[in-house]
Image: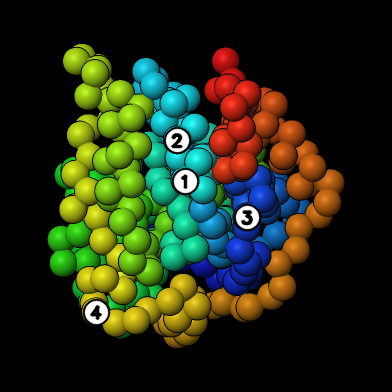
Amino acid sequence: MSFSVNQPFHWMDSGVYRGQPLEPLARDEALAAGMQAESAVPVIHLWVYDQALYLGRRDARLPHLEEALRQFGQDGFGCVLRSSGGACVPLDAGVLNVAWLLPDTTISIDSFFSFVAEMLRVGLRDYGVLEFGEVVGSYCAGEYDFSLHGKKIGGMAQRRTRYGSILQICINIEERPRGEWMERFYAIAGLDEMEAHKPIPTIVGSTVGSIAGLTGQPTTVDDVKARLFAAIRSQWPALPVPFSVQDELLAESEHHLANRLQLFSFTAKELATPQWRLPK
């Protein structure tokens, strides 16, 4: 492996979010902006959002996206257009999101993926052997899907900022019908009506699973957090610290995501209102 860290990762858990779905992404962005400081250290940021659809840029091309989001809003889902990778991912209280942030913009994409993949192999080894590679038919399918027993339990996406690198993952831990949710979402959004140049392949819900469902163990998000931290710290330097980010950097990051990158964000309550419309 062509990359290693000498400074301890700061392990930060910012908890569970139920407000604007953009909020945890803005915190990731602010942490990355903080990488410009001479004293910057690598960070592992953990968070949960209950519950929302985290859309990719490709989803914006769906012919009936507004109707799909409105119906999911009525079912209690918020939504956000994210800036990194792929297509729609459903998040809920049983999904753990983890962001690795480095004060380094020179690390190659493949090296960063490989480094985090090794951390995941170690961190989740109590649940079985992770396999990496695209799970065909899964939502947000890609080269760096990771799976147990042939079913996708998570994926990775990364991006560069001016001062740092971010690799974000989500891990399906507690069992939910996430694959079926995505089948329904894309059916309503009109994916099958797009005869040519489909932005997303057909979704097959049965290709997706969770740690609890695939192992038969009553595993929770807190269980995985604890095991992940213990296993990672056995091989890499890591230090648990309270989550903190400068207010100024957070405000700048929120402005950057919402205004410069034009990422929209709505709570379930906002989506369910009769007057809601998708931003043009």
Query: In the visual, does 38 lie left or right of 122?
Result: right
Q: Judge the density around disc 1: few (<14), some (14-19), many (≥20) Cα neighbours within 10 Å.
A: few
Amino acid, disc 3: Arg
Q: Which residue is mark 3?
A: 18
Q: Nearer the viewer, residue 211 or 98?
A: 211
Of the residues under marks 4 and 2, which one precedes in the sequence?
A: 2
Q: On the rendered image, what quadrant is the N terminus found in?
A: bottom left
Q: Is residue 275 left or right of residue 155?
A: right
N-term-proximal mark, 3 vs 4: 3
Instruction: Name the secondary structure under disc 4.
Output: loop
| Residue bearing the label numbered 1 | 75
Q: Which residue is mark 4?
A: 216
Query: x, y (%) of residue 213?
Result: 26, 71
* Residue located 69% across and 26% down the image: 259
Tag 1 and tag 2, C-beta contact below 8 Å: yes
In space, the residues marked 4 and 1 are separated at their CA atoms by 28 Å
